[in-house]
Image: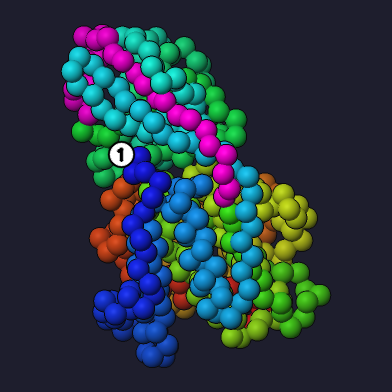
């Protein structure tokens, strides 16, 4: 993996000095001065996120992201609450598959088993053989057929280890990683994820049932992870609060994956800081997205009644800032769905897909759904999903991010009463 340290983040003033203001699309509507100012703030936030190169939970970059968000909260005139909790971090040592004189470095699944420092040797086999070191393809989406096959093989436990080659189809070729949804309850054999480029020679080695050396050496480190929170007390504190949440961690830099959620979260915070809403608004940016939502679970454990007690939750999910993203909108009721779609229509926007009301939603909205809470949610897809090349400015659609930020901010204003 790209290590645990990012480059030193430039100051906000340095970012400002080198950042040109991009032209705002005429169809955004409203006050041109306000729209230009919003776009400038959003671009600055995205660039600041991108300068921290590693957002994986529990890393130095993750800690710096918490500090950056806390600083943004202070700049808005509010008091941040950085809630740190114990976290057992996976530290990657030697992780590779070697056949003859050729090796591929990789990243193990964070919710599987690991080897010791010496690893072990076994012949390579197709995954379907159910023996030795199985080799297969995968995509970062759990819905992909190849990924479902990988999951089934992990559960049957017949392989000594598995090498999973990134398919490089729906997502760019390279090493786009799978989330560790079972981080707290690991299962199955060690699985090493390797980049697309290693597929051809590994496939040839499988055909020969070649003997391979497999190492997935991971050590555990006790550290701290953190959620970043604040609240704005409403004009009528007796009303049930609105909660606005977004994930704030990722495997790599993952700029377009996280940029949309971060943009809406910060713009909503700035808006309500200067225009006090009728009901209290709680903001939470949670780490641990890629690890089974451990940060959100910690947040919810601190106030279990909030899921149902909140007036509504706004979930600002992944990927809707990405170029070419197919935007998905989710809501817990027909009323919230209708009101949300009206906010999109007012800006000439329309989600590409809508999760049926009867279906369990994607992303962190599922935590609220499982707890019986009310929610609206936005997310999307992304050709750079979980890929190291998801970086500013290549992967980000700024103008659409501004439009979607305005739409979600209007939903927040309606739900908060201000």
SS at mark 1 in the image: loop
Can you say which quadrant of the picture contains the N terminus?
top left
Residue at image point 67% right, 76% down: 232
Can you give x and y, in whole percent of width and height, for residue 403 in the image? 40, 74
Can you give x and y, in whole percent of width and height, for residue 215 in the image? 37, 21
Residue at image point 49% right, 36% down: 90
Q: Is residue 109 left or right of residue 333?
A: left
Residue 347 visible in the shown view = yes
Q: Nearer the viewer, residue 335 or 23?
A: 23
Q: Say which quarter of the image contains residue 15.
A: bottom left
Q: Nearer the viewer, residue 102 or 331?
A: 102
Residue 270 visible in the shown view = no
Q: Which residue is mark 1?
A: 175
Can you give x and y, in whole percent of width and height, for residue 295 in the image? 60, 50
- Are there few (<14), some (14-19), or many (20+) residues within 10 Å of tag 1? many
Q: Say which quarter of the image contains residue 174.
A: top left
**Residue 369, magenta (yes or no):** no
Give the residues drawn in magenta, as a range.
198-225
Can you give x and y, in whole percent of width and height, for residue 382 in the image? 35, 52
Residue at image point 35% right, 68% down: 10
């Amino acid at each position: 993996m790209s290590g645990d340290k990012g480059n030193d983040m430039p100051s906000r003033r340095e970012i400002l000095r080198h950042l040109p203001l991009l032209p705002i699309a005429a169809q955004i509507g409203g006050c041109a001065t306000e729209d230009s100012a919003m776009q400038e703030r959003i671009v600055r936030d995205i660039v600041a996120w991108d300068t921290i190169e590693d957002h994986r939970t529990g890393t130095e970059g993750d800690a710096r992201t918490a500090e950056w968000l806390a600083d943004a909260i202070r700049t808005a005139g509010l008091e941040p609450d950085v809630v740190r909790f114990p976290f057992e971090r996976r530290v990657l040592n030697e992780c590779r598959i070697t056949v003859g004189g050729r090796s591929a470095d990789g990243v193990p699944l964070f919710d599987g088993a690991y080897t010791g420092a010496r690893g072990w040797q076994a012949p390579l086999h197709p995954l379907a053989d159910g023996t030795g070191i199985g080799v297969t393809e995968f995509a970062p989406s759990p819905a992909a057929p190849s990924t479902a096959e990988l999951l089934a093989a992990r559960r049957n436990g017949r392989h000594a280890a598995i090498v999973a080659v990134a398919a490089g189809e729906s997502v760019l070729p390279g090493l786009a990683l799978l989330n560790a949804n079972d981080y707290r309850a690991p299962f199955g054999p060690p699985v090493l994820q390797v980049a697309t480029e290693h597929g051809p020679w590994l496939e040839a080695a499988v055909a020969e049932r070649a003997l391979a050396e497999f190492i997935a050496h991971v050590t555990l480190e006790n550290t701290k992870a953190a959620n970043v929170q604040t609240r704005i007390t409403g004009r009528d504190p007796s009303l049930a609060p609105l909660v606005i949440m977004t994930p704030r961690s990722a495997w790599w830099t993952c700029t377009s994956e996280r940029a949309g959620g971060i943009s809406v979260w910060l713009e909503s915070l700035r808006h309500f800081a200067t225009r006090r809403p009728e009901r209290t608004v709680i903001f939470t940016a949670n780490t641990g997205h890629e690890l089974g939502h451990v940060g959100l679970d910690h947040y919810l454990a601190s106030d279990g009644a909030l899921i149902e007690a909140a007036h509504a939750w706004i979930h600002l999910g992944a990927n809707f800032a990405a170029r070419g993203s197919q935007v998905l909108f989710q809501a817990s009721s027909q009323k919230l769905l209708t009101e949300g779609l009206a906010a999109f229509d007012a800006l000439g926007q329309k989600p590409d897909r809508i999760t049926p009301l009867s279906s369990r939603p994607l992303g962190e909205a599922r935590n609220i759904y499982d707890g019986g809470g009310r929610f609206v949610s936005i997310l999307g897809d992304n050709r750079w999903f979980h890929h190291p090349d998801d970086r500013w400015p290549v992967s980000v659609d700024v103008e659409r991010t501004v439009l979607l930020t305005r739409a979600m901010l209007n939903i927040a204003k309606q739900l908060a009463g201000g």
